[in-house]
Image: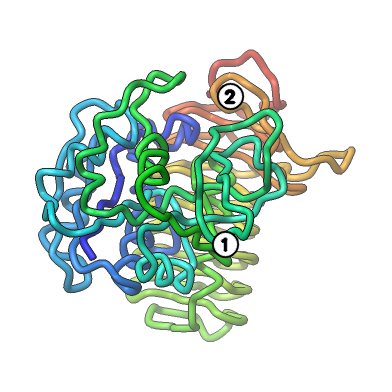
Amino acid sequence: MQTVLLAAGRGTRMAPLTANVAKPMLPVAGEPLVGHAAETAVETGASRLVVVVGYRGGDVREYFGDEFRGVPVTTVEQESQRGTADAVRAAAPELDDDEPFVVLNGDALHDERGLEELYGNGPAVGSFRVDDPSSYGVLHTSDDGSRVTGVTEKPADPPSDLVNTGAYVFPAAAQAWLDVGESERGELELTDVLERACERVDVTPVAFDRWLDVGRPWELLEANEWKLGELDRRIDGDVHEDADLRGDVVVEEGAEVDAGVVVEGPALVREGASIGPNAYVRGATLLGRDASVGHSVEVKNSVFSAGATAGHLAYVGDSVLGRDVNLGAGTKVANLRHDDQPVEVVVKGERTSTGRRKFGVVLGDDAKTGINTSLNAGVKLDSEGYTMPGETLLFGDDDPRSQS
């Protein structure tokens, strides 16, 4: 089925990681986030992809080219990010107007079984049950649960815990329903098109076993935990005989693991990356191309984007490092609050709970720390931000280097 993949957004809630990278292109287990969305779509039913690009769209175009996993790809540009309905409207000229079409968010992960069922049961919308539905679009269904009758965005008093996953199968006629008005957020929302579909045809709610909307840095960490957990052990790089690789560890050709290193999978060490000597990597960890974990460094459950480096005597836990970050010797990251409450992070100027008992820091591209820096749980450093030797950054500082 022809499939529209939405990949135009910048992802302001993902700051500072998106200062130079479109959110759909952030790294997840060796591929950009949008690559996983596209791959699942192709494996479960997409016969053609129309990819909508916007912010840093050239990077997305280059990634996909004209074909992806044997499926033809067309890219179109959403000139200004005015909402999801506007994005689909940008794609509409490339769609066959007499065939149904699927719309998927390029920054979300879906389980294969659920997406395959979605493709086979249109018109349909993906659904998922969550503990706190007030932050999502909540689906209304018929008494027997077989039909979707409407959707309410972020209700104060949710009628159910069943939320919209942003995965749709629309009938061909829906191409004429894209001329919606602006929502309260000032955007043209695809949920308004869903409402129109519910009025005209039977729309089936398709339940996903697993779904992740990747909008904030800790969700990028969770996405890597998901996809790294699917790896099978493979050692193609240069591994010293005194290194100890345990479990599902992938060392790509051109990567190096030195003496005295212990790596506990799942972990992916990409081409050009290096570990050691005498380093410890554990948990679901991605070391991107040319990343480096040096002497006596411990890394736990973290993402090192391409070129990120922790050279000596550092600890990094449950953190996300942008491209070419450099941690000075002795840098330590805290990832646990003394009161054992979920770690909070500033998102668009507001303290926001990650929902995670353990979460470290988020460092933008080219951020640098001086020697013996201490970073408290939840701290963010903007792109090209820095610390001085011996400096401590605590969550909530007024220092503009640590707030996004």
Residue nearest the viewer, comparing 368 with 109: 109
Q: Can you identify the residue that label 1 sits on? A: 225
* Circle 1 residues within 10 Å: few <14, some 14–19, many ≥20: many
The answer to whether residue 313 is visible is yes
Quick check: 282 above or below 16? below
Name the residue at 48% across, 68% down.
Answer: 114
Helix, strand or loop under label 1: helix
Query: Viewer-nearest of labels 2 and 1?
Result: 1
Quick check: 169 above or below 44? above
* Image quadrant where one finds the N terminus: bottom left
Q: Can you identify the residue that label 2 sits on? A: 402
Name the residue at 13% across, 64% down.
Answer: 72
Q: Extreme right residue here?
A: 339
Could you say where residue 240 lies in the image, as x and y percent from the top left?
50, 81
Relative horizontal placement of residue 194, taking residue 227 as reference (left or right): left
Residue nearest the viewer, comparing 369 with 102: 102
Helix, strand or loop under label 2: helix
